[in-house]
Image (cartoon, coloured by chain):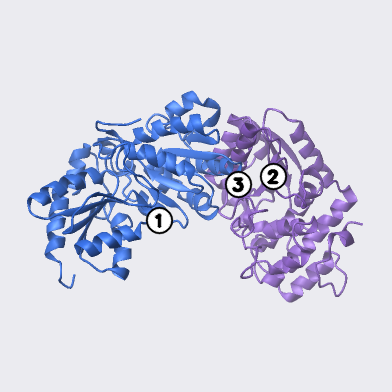
Chain colours: A blue, B purple
Amino acid sequence: MTFTSPTGIRNGFGQALVELGRTNPDVVALTADLADPTRVRRFAEKFPDRFFQMGISENDMIGTAAGLALGGKIPFATTFAIFGTSLANQPVRLHLGYNHFNVKLVCSHGGVTVGPDGATHQAFEDLALMRLIPGLTVVAPCDANEAYKATLAIAEYDGPVYMRVGRIDTPIVTAAESPFTLGKANVLRDGDDLALFCVGSMVPTSLEAADVLADRGINCRVVNVHTLKPLDEKAVLDATRACGAVVTAEEHSVLGGLGSAVAEVLCCLAPAPVEMVGVNDTFGESGEPDEILSKYGLTSEAIVDAALRAVSRKGSAG
Amino acid sequence: MKLDLEQLAHLAGQIRRDVVRMISAAGSGHPGGALGAAEIFAALYGHEMHHSADNITDPGRDRFFLSNGHICAAWYSVLARVGYLEPAELGSLRKMGSRLQGHPSREKWPEVVESSSGPLGQGLSVANGLALANTLSGDRGRVYCLVGDGELQEGIIWEAILSASHYGLADVTLIVSDNDLQIDGAVSSVKGIQPLGAKFNSFGWHAVEIDGHDTEALIGAFAEARAEKSRPTAVIAETVMGRGVSFMENLAKWHGACPSADETAAALEELGAAPGYTDYPPLQEVIR
């Protein structure tokens, strides 16, 4: 299955889950009254015995998934990012974290692009909350093709995972043959003037920005950090050492997500100017996704500006 | 393991002595609920559950989840008494490096503690999930989960109660140690949860209300649960916090208080420990 035109990242997950249903009898799926939006509906229809509708009970869904994992199953528990990571944070900490059960928490509607639903439904902090839990792998694929591969990869991996998938149609920037290995960042574009680390829906935006920057004589190394944890520190260090200036871009708070993860590594091992593009410690609001992205500075223009600042700081004390 | 009623009474007594000594030695812990659940643990591990310390991971075994993890001293004790650990190890409760963590830890003792507990309300969801997995896999083991009555103030437990009846999880048995006490006082005064039998029945469960210190009644309730083929069963076991130690009985302060040396000696005397009693004797000396 290959996606060629813009589509929701979640659609790659939904397709892959059906494939897993065919190939792996241990895979089961749960949802909390969100079968359609999380894209588990097709799995539910094809494999009804292995699908558990938990109702509007996210905490119970995580605990039930834990019990299924204890019984040898590979449960994919699905809901919206804000509910899976914030509302159900305690059972996620206990069961995916401390108990290290083999549960895959896959959440759609991460980030700001829930749009008109407003601030209560927009998850700017899901990656940070999940990154704080010891032993949890945190993944955010950049398009539907990558989501497809990531879903197969996390099913194969024996351990707890949080995966964020987006709702709205976003460009396809990877191909069926593009590599995907959990924990290994992918260099999508080579360059030696600026290291541009990006994740999820901001990967296509970063590639756009890189084109603009190239026209201005700044060659970006665009690194898709699809696995936020464990972070591919080598890729971060290699790109930073080669380029000497860094921009991070994420549809997420600048606190605790990709920007923080990169800065945590660099401040210890390879200090360099870092500019972070993300949501600046605030809640969102209702609006169309593109309006919100624009207001909160999650655009290619914002990345270009950040890149110019980072490059201008090269060689300075920071 | 099928102990008779006299043996179960001895086992419950031994659990109580262990609990007092373990918590006294640890310098902290939760004696009240642990003492109140001694017969429940004795009936489960000494009679009801299909399990063996010699074959811990037998896929057909019955499974147990302690949701109110703070009363784990009683659980560790019964596990020692039926062969899952050397009784001497009970003295390591709550100490650095011990498998016997202050709240049960899967990380520290994965073969036995199937799911860590401590944050209240979490156990039944896991029990349900395991029962669903067993159904898919064709494993027939039953699943038991123990909660406290105050714990039923947690929202997640009612989500799980709905799930168990919705999915008709007849292999799940929930035991409520119903002592009407929690940290801030009587459950009925903090935030009442009665009538529990009517609540469980109306939530699609099979509710059985018994005296939680009557091992014969506990065994009977578990047999009723086994006979039930379409609904999960809630065994609402009326218990007394601190049972067996007169100065601890029915006092919320003993939820999480450690007895002094004098109190420990007085408690052990009341619990039938011989003068000079200092060790954790093996099961054979208890089960005559």
Q: Amino acid at mark 1?
A: Pro
Instruction: Name the residue tied to disc 3.
Output: B123
Q: Chain of mark 1?
A: A
Rendering coords of residue B14 (x, y %): 82, 60
For residue A132, which quarter of the picture?
A: bottom left
Density class for disc 3 (Cα within 10 Å; few <14, some 14-19, many ≥20) is many
Element class at badge 3 = helix
Rendering coords of residue B277 (x, y %): 84, 72
Q: Chain of mark 3?
A: B
For residue B103, which quarter of the picture?
A: bottom right
Instruction: Measure the alpha-carbon separation of dots 2 and 1.
Output: 34 Å
Rendering coords of residue B59 (x, y %): 70, 42
For residue B264, which quarter of the picture?
A: bottom right
Locate the N terminus of chain A and report the quarter of the image it occupies: top left
Instruction: Measure the alpha-carbon separation of dots 3 and 2.
Output: 12 Å
Side (left or right) of A261 relative to A88? left
Element class at badge 2 = strand
Instruction: Name the residue tied to disc 1.
Output: A230
Whether residue B96 is visible, yes or no, is: yes
Rendering coords of residue B45 (x, y %): 77, 49
Instruction: Measure the alpha-carbon separation of dots 1 and 3.
Output: 29 Å
